[in-house]
């Protein structure tokens, strides 16, 4: 029935923009919606259930009005690869699943719903594509239809269905039914004292309208009567989340996607509904069950069963999901994304975030890296939870999150109270303070922020202070890793990218190659335990991505006599990883690009050698090179989107352009460079 929503506290709050559906030109008042823990879940729910909830259409819910619970569940083959967890949210009618948050959010299968009925009937819980846990307990504590077991004790349960259901190879062979198109459904299903199914017959029940069988599914061998088949193929209003309008005459849902194949024929039974015993026709599919109650009002005679509720009671006893699902098996592999992914560095602090996310979506970028300053968020003079000021970062994270843009946060900037002299990193006795900050950060954005890059270019004194030494970064990364994982086990922790340089003066810079060798050698390579992904920042200067010093220096007349000026320097860093036994981990480029600028800042004169078209060609070539030759590459985040705009980067005192302008793919006036379109073409093809 069209009951009002019961809002239950969210596991992960999502700040969603208001949605105002329109029918024709008339705005329709929108009811409150369930609290969604993933934007994809909201999009799917709104499409079919919003018109039901606000009274635009008289039909039953596809997903249900009530949110039961949400969190991580074990699934070996979920993304990120090696994570062994997927995010789920339970509603009345089923469970929504996000197996691959890095997939195409526009795909019908971005959000799925599991084979819950198969699990309830078989007693086998699926925890991977090929991993099953036998509970030896098919669900005998929840009726398939009607009220709960306490007041509906005679109703068939999921265990009752075992005698007629096709839930594994043996039962498929035993319970396959012949094609009965044209016949009527009069078979009944009751249960014996042990809960097992007993099939009978009541010819009088075949007199209800719609009991004639009109479809036989040959996959598992079951028949579907007209009253259910018509519901499965109905048309009517659906909500278009893109245009925010309600569109009439749409097929409401794809029954195979929503329900799976039928695993039983349809059977009549007697169950209590709202305390009144009545005839109900029920049929179960792999993912859902359908009920037909002839005494219900029109529009609600056929309904999705409350499989989500039933499964939750069976699995969790009606309580709450564990805060953290323990993973007892070893991690299959380090966390990683499945394919090379397109990212970009953007600045969203105090910006028109709708404009920025609009550019990101237009580009086809799936990831945004946002640098954050620790000292701007934490007030070290206070020692209470309110010492963290999240207001602006909350807005940034939510703006990206609701548009399915994946987020890398990169903290820098130690508060002065936690560091000494010219140091950029926390003092050794203040490392716990950094751990506390990272725990608070990951706990606040659990499920929203996928990755944390721990610091930036630590081999430069301007980032880590003078006296550069790896023994200062190892404990920092350890604290960050343990703190992030305690708050959000599925979050990816990244080794902060180093700056490509051959300068070797610990008071100024240390070569990135040497720094990486030293950090792997430190304390028998313990650093390997403290990160999932290696961050890198390749140079490029005036050299195309295919060149490398000294074997193939390319045509550039300058900035060509050291590998630090070449994109392919990352191959040397990658070899250090592999030689150190860390080749299973992915590399993510959290900054890379080429500068084109006729008035570059001092030290960036090479930007004059690159035309804007060359900038575009080099960026295109870098992505293509990675796709063809770097199977270990994950996210490649271009530097940069909007740092050249006047409201982000102010004019410099010496009249020359800030170095960030030349690397941008937007000009100072916001117009798009050729690099914008080159990136866009590749990113959208990749999707």
Image (tube, rainbow, N blue to C red):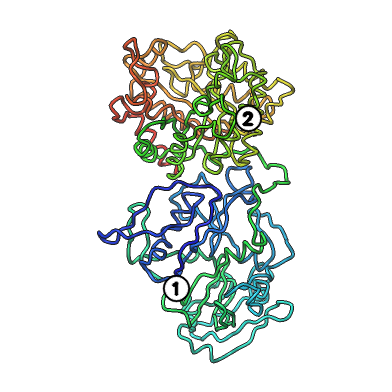
Q: Which mark is residue 435?
A: 2
- Residue 542 position by quadrant: top left
Relative to residue 96, is residue 273 depicted above or below? below
Question: Picture coordinates of residue 548 (x, y %)?
Answer: 50, 18
- Residue 137 position by quadrant: bottom right
Relative to residue 65, is residue 277 depicted above or below? below
Of the pair 569 and 275, the residue shown nearer to us: 275
Q: Residue at x 47, y 24 (%)?
A: 546
Residue 616 visible in the current orientation: no
Tell me the element at label 2: helix
Question: Picture coordinates of residue 332 (x, y %)?
Answer: 68, 42
Mark closest to the chain's N terminus, 2 or 1:
1
Relative to residue 673, is residue 111 depicted above or below? below
Residue 562 visible in the current orientation: yes
Of the pair 149 and 169, the residue shown nearer to us: 149
- Residue 46 position by quadrant: bottom left
Rendered-image quadrant of the C terminus: top left
Question: Picture coordinates of residue 625 (x, y %)?
Answer: 48, 30
Q: Residue at x 47, y 79 (%)?
A: 296
* Number of other residues with Cα within 10 Å of mark 2, as a class: few under 14, some 14 to 19, many 20 or more: many
Q: Which mark is residue 312?
A: none
Residue highlighted by disc 1: 231
Q: Residue at x 55, y 39 (%)?
A: 444
Left or right, 93 with reference to 604? right
Of the pair 416 and 405, the residue shown nearer to us: 416
How far apart are labels 2 and 1 at the CA level?
54 Å
Task: Answer whether labels 2 and 1 touch (C-beta < 8 Å).
Answer: no
Tell me the element at label 1: helix
Question: Picture coordinates of residue 554 (x, y %)?
Answer: 44, 17
Relative to residue 380, is residue 327 depicted above or below? below
Point out the frontmost of discs 2 and 1: 2
């Amino acid at each position: 029935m069209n009951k009002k929503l019961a809002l239950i506290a969210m596991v992960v709050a999502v700040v969603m923009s208001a949605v105002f559906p329109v029918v024709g030109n008339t705005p329709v008042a929108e009811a409150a919606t369930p609290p969604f823990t993933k934007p994809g879940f909201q999009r799917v729910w709104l499409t079919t259930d919003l018109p039901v909830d606000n009274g635009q259409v008289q039909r039953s819910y596809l997903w249900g009005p009530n949110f039961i619970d949400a969190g991580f569940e074990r699934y070996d083959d979920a993304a990120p690869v090696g994570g062994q967890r997927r995010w789920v949210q339970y509603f009345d009618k089923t469970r929504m699943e996000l197996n691959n948050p890095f997939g195409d959010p526009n795909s019908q299968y971005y959000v799925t719903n599991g084979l819950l009925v198969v699990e309830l009937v078989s007693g086998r819980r699926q925890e991977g594509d090929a991993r099953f846990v036998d509970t030896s307990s098919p669900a005998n504590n929840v009726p398939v239809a009607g009220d709960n077991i306490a007041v509906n004790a005679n109703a068939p349960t999921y265990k009752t269905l075992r005698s007629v259901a096709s839930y594994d190879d043996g039962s498929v062979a035993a319970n396959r039914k012949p094609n009965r198109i044209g016949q009527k459904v009069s078979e009944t299903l009751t249960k014996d004292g042990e809960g097992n199914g007993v099939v009978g017959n009541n010819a009088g029940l075949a007199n209800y309208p719609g009991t004639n069988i009109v479809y036989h599914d040959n996959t598992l061998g079951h028949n579907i009567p007209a009253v259910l088949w018509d519901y499965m193929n109905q048309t009517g209003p659906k909500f278009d989340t893109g245009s925010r309008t309600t569109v009439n005459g749409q097929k409401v849902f794809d029954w195979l996607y929503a329900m799976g194949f039928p695993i039983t024929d349809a059977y009549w039974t007697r169950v209590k509904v709202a305390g009144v015993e009545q005839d109900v026709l029920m049929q179960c599919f792999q993912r859902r069950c359908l009920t037909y109650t002839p005494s219900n009002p029109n529009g609600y005679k056929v309904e999705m069963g409350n499989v989500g509720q039933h499964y939750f009671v069976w699995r969790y006893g009606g309580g709450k999901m564990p805060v953290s699902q323990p993973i007892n098996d070893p991690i299959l592999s380090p966390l990683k994304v499945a394919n090379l992914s397109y990212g970009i560095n953007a600045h969203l602090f105090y910006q028109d975030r709708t404009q920025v996310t609009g550019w990101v979506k237009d580009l086809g970028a799936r990831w945004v890296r946002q640098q954050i300053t620790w000292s701007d968020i934490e007030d070290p003079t206070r020692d209470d939870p309110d010492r963290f000021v999240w207001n602006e970062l909350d807005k940034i994270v939510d703006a990206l999150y609701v548009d399915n843009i994946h987020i890398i946060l990169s903290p820098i900037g130690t508060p002065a109270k936690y560091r000494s002299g010219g140091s950029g990193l926390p003092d050794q006795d203040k490392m716990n303070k950094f751990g506390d900050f990272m725990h608070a950060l990951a706990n606040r954005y659990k499920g929203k922020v996928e990755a944390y890059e721990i610091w930036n270019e630590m081999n430069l004194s301007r980032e880590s202070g003078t006296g550069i030494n790896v023994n200062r970064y190892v404990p920092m990364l350890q604290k960050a890793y343990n703190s992030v994982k305690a708050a959000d086990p599925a979050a990816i922790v990244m080794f902060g990218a180093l700056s490509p340089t051959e300068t070797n003066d610990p008071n100024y810079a240390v070569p990135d190659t040497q720094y990486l060798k030293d950090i792997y050698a430190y304390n028998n390579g313990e650093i390997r335990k403290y990160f999932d992904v290696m961050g890198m920042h390749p140079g490029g200067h005036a050299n195309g991505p295919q060149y490398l010093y000294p074997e193939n220096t390319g045509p550039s007349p300058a900035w060509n006599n050291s590998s630090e000026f070449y994109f392919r320097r990352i191959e040397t860093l990658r070899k250090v990883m592999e030689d150190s036994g860390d080749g299973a981990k992915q590399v993510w480029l959290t900054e890379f690009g080429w500068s084109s600028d006729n008035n570059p800042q001092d030290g960036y004169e090479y930007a004059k050698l690159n035309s804007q078209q060359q900038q575009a060609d080099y960026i295109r070539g870098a992505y293509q090179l990675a796709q063809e030759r770097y199977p270990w590459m994950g996210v490649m985040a271009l530097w940069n989107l909007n740092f050249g705009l006047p409201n982000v980067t102010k004019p410099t005192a010496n009249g020359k352009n800030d170095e960030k302008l030349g690397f941008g793919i937007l000009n100072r006036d916001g117009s798009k460079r050729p690099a914008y379109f080159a990136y866009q073409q590749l990113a959208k093809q990749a999707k």
